Image (cartoon, helix red, strand yellow):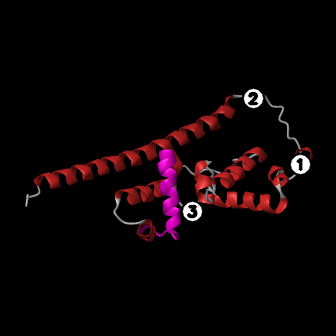
Amino acid sequence: MVKFSEEFRAHVVFDYLNGHVGAKKVAEKHGIKSEQTVIDWVNRYRLSGVESFEIRRPDRVYDGDFKVEVIEWMKRTGASLTRTALHFDITAVSTLHKWKKKWEEEGIEALYRQKGRPASMVSKKTNHSSKNNSESSPDLEKEVNQLKKENRLLKIENDYLKKLKALIQQKKDFEKNKPKQ
C-alpha cells in the first residue's frame, strides 16, 4: 500500500517550493513524520519534474551488473545512499542499503543471486487459446490511466507556476510602487 498519493506529494513539494518555511514546517503542516521525506520529494522533483510524483510499483528488477555499477559509483564518488538513489533513480534508499550490506558481508557474487526459485523450478503455464483484441484492451486502459495521471500532474505543476509568476509580479509591483526614502 502506498502511503502518500501522487497528488499529495505534488502538493507538498509545491508548498515547500512556494513557501518561505523549511522542510520541517512543511512536514508538520502535512502530517509527514520526517522532514527528510519532504527534502527527498523536492530533490526528486528537481531532478525528474512531475514524473517524480509517479508511484512506481515494485515490479522493477535490477540485474547484478546494475547493482555492482551503483555500489562502485557510490564508493568511487563518496556519495551518500540518498544521493546515489537520486542519481540512479532508485526510489527506496533502503534498497541501496541492502545491496551495500550484501556486498560487504557476502561479496560481489551476492548481488548477482536472484530471489525466489530458480527458473527451472517455476512451472510454465501455457495458454493455447487464440489471441484476440481483449489482450490489448488492458494495455490501452493502462496507457489511458497513465496519461490521465500525467495530465493531472501537469495541471498541478501549471497551477504552481502560475501562482509563482503571480507572486513574482506582485513583488515587482510592490517594489516599483514602494515610496522612495
In this picture, residue 49 sits left or right of residue 171: right
Quarter residue 155 falls in: top left
Q: Where 1 sits versus 144, above or below?
A: below
Quarter residue 75 falls in: bottom right
Q: Earlier in the sequence, mark 1 or mark 2?
A: 1
Residue at image mark 1: 118
Which residues, given as a range, are shown in magenta?
29-50
Q: Where 61 sits versus 140, above or below?
A: below
Give whichever of 171, 160 is nearer the camera: 171
**The disc labelled 2 sits on which kind of residue?**
Lys
1 or 2: mark nearer the eye: 1
Q: Which residue corresponds to the image point at 80% horizontal and 52% vertical from the top-left?
A: 111
**How far from the left and from the top, in percent, is residue 170?**
21, 52
Confirm or deny contact between disc 3 and disc 1 (CB under 8 A): no
Residue at image mark 2: 131
Q: CA distance from mark 3 to mark 2?
A: 38 Å
Residue at image mark 3: 3
Q: Main secondary structure of the magenta part?
A: helix
